[in-house]
Each structure stands twice: as C-alpha cells, then as structure tokens.
Image: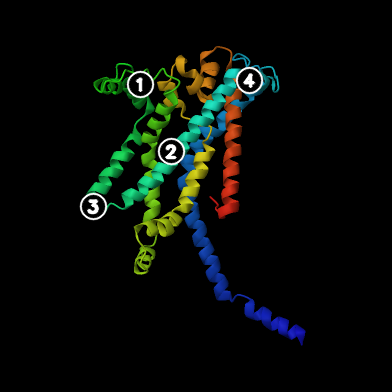
Amino acid sequence: MEEIIEKAETEETAPLPEEQGQRAKRKKINLKEQLILHSMLFPGVVLVIIFMVVPMIGVVMAFEKYNVAQGFFGSPWVGFKNFSNLFNRPDFWQATRNTFIIAFWKIVFTSTLSILLALLINEIRLRFIKKTVQTVLFLPYFLSWALLGNIMVDLFSYSGAINYFLEMMGIDPVYFITSNRWFRIIIVATDVWKTIGYQIVVFLAAITNIDPALYEAAKIDGANHTQLVLHITLPGIMSMVVLMSILNIGNIMNAGFDQILVMYNPSVYETGDILDTMAYRIGLLQVGQYSIGTAIGFFKSVISAVFFSTSYFIAYKTKGYKIF
C-alpha cells in the first residue's frame, strides 16, 4: 500500500514532458541572452586584465632589492626587509595617519551632505530649477584636478581672491596653502565640492525608484513631509546608502593622490603628505627606491582590502545586503 502511495505521489510531482520541454527552451533562451550580455562585457574585462591584473606582477618588487637591469625575476630577494625599513621610518606613519584623517573626513562630509542635498533637491517641484541645481552640483565632477588644483592654489594663495576679500573686511591675509592648520580643511572642502554631485545623482536615482503609492498611502494616513522622508524615502534608498558606504570605506586609504599632488608643498608634509604621494616621491623621484615605493603601495592595498571586506561583512550580517 505504501509503495502504491509513494508511486502516486512521484507521478503527481514529476514534471510533464511538455513542462520539461518548456523549461529546457526557457533555459536555452536565458543562456543565449546571458551570452550576449557577457559578450558586451568582454572588451572591458580585457582592458581590466591588461591594465590592472597583468601589472600586478610588479608587486614582487616589494620583496626584492629591485634593479632595473636585472628585472622582476632577476633582482635579489630580500623578503620583508623593505617593509621592516619602511615601518621604521617616522614619515611613513605620519603619512599613514594623514591618509586616514583626510579620507575619513572626505567620506563623512561627502556621504552626509549628498544624502541631505538629494532629499532637499527631491522636494523641488519646478523641473527647470531642479535640473539646474543638479547640473551645477554635478559639473565639477567632470573637471580634472590638474585644472582645479591649480585654480584652488591660486584662489587660496597669499595674493589670491580669498585673501583679497579678507583684506576688504579688515582681516590680515593668511598663508592657506602653506599652513598645516588650513591645508587639510582646504583639501577636504574642495574634494567634497567636486565629488558631491555624483553621489547626489545616485541617491536621486534611488529615490525615483520608490513606489509613489507608498507616499500616497502615507499622506492619506496624515503623514507630513518629515514623516514621509524618515519612514519612506530614507528606508527606500537605504540599500544604495549601504552600497555607497561599502565602496567609500573600501577607499579609506585613497585620500586623493592627484588632488594633493597638485596642491601640496614641502611646508605642509606634516599634515598633507599621504601614502600615495610618499610612494610617488620615494618610488619615482628618488632613483633606486622602487622597492620601497612598491612596498608602500602594497601595504595600502592590503589595508584597503581589509576595510572593504569588513564593511561588506558588517553590511551582510546587519542588513542582509549583498552586492552579488
């Protein structure tokens, strides 16, 4: 009896030949669509391999006493000696500290202000004004620090426009660019001004994906603007906030090499020199120091990977968020 019942259940749950055929057909169609999409990624993947994966061979320089004539695989192996010498340099820990401080405040102000401004811009009802504000905020993102950096140096120089207005108000001129007190503030403020537009656009795009029916239902229940923002808009964009936070924390060791390289000078090394600029000076400007410069870059990459993995793990455990 039991065998008959099991056989009947098996026959009921087993897919019919027609269903099997439809599933196979759908699988074949999906495979064809995925193949097309993956083929579109192929040129980008090739470029990433050529310009990012293949150059990783150069990491071996961090463990060698690298000599240009002997090459990667002919230079004498020294193990962790380069790292030992690096960790004994006081300017290395100063550059590490500057990197953390500058990157941390860039992330804090950029993330906070971008969310706030995205919420405010979303409340603008006149389409022309809304698009104009978005364009004005987003435009600096497309400009290079090679251009903006020199403009900022001229703007904050002793004879620049900022000091000109200070003199008009009866305030003595300030050496902004050569002052350890002001340099970090200028670096953080100008970077926030340049990059905030990108994150604003990202958060505005996330806001537009929120179901309008949620707002209508909340208004019927008597919710005001503040309650709509706190209970619908913010939760609706939280997944994007988490994603951007993970990406930002992964860049905690990238304090802005191109920006600082253009704007800094030896008088502000104490507060403005970061790991990237230190690696550039030692690895490229000082002949024969390629291994030390590579060791700095390798150290920075390892720390970045640890921060990225930790932030992703926390987001997954607390919010169940996954990128893939």
Reading the image, the residue beneath label 3 is 126
At a point 38% along the width and 41% down the height, the residue shown is: 198
Q: Mark number for residue 121?
A: none
Spatial CA distance of label 3 from label 2 is 27 Å
Residue 237 versus residue 71 in the image, above or below: below
State yes or no: discs 1 and 3 in contact (Cβ < 8 Å).
no
Q: In the rendered view of the protein, which quadrant contains the N terminus?
A: bottom right
Looking at the image, tell me whether mark 2 or mark 4 is earlier in sequence order.
4
Residue 300 x, y percent position in the rendering = 58, 29
Closest to the observer: 70 or 176?
Answer: 176
Farthest residue toward the top? Answer: 287
Q: Amino acid at mark 1?
A: Val
Total number of numbered discs in the rendering = 4
Q: Amino acid at mark 4?
A: Leu
Closest to the observer: 265 or 163?
Answer: 163
Task: Examine the image and state in which quarter residue 185 appears.
Answer: top left
Looking at the image, tell me whether mark 3 or mark 4 is earlier in sequence order.
4
Q: Mark number for residue 153?
A: 1
Spatial CA distance of label 4 from label 1 is 31 Å
Looking at the image, tell me whether mark 3 or mark 2 is earlier in sequence order.
2
Spatial CA distance of label 1 from label 2 is 22 Å
Residue 42 x, y percent position in the rendering = 49, 43
Q: Mark number for residue 86?
A: 4
Residue 71 versus residue 108 in the image, above or below: above
Q: Amino acid at mark 3?
A: Leu
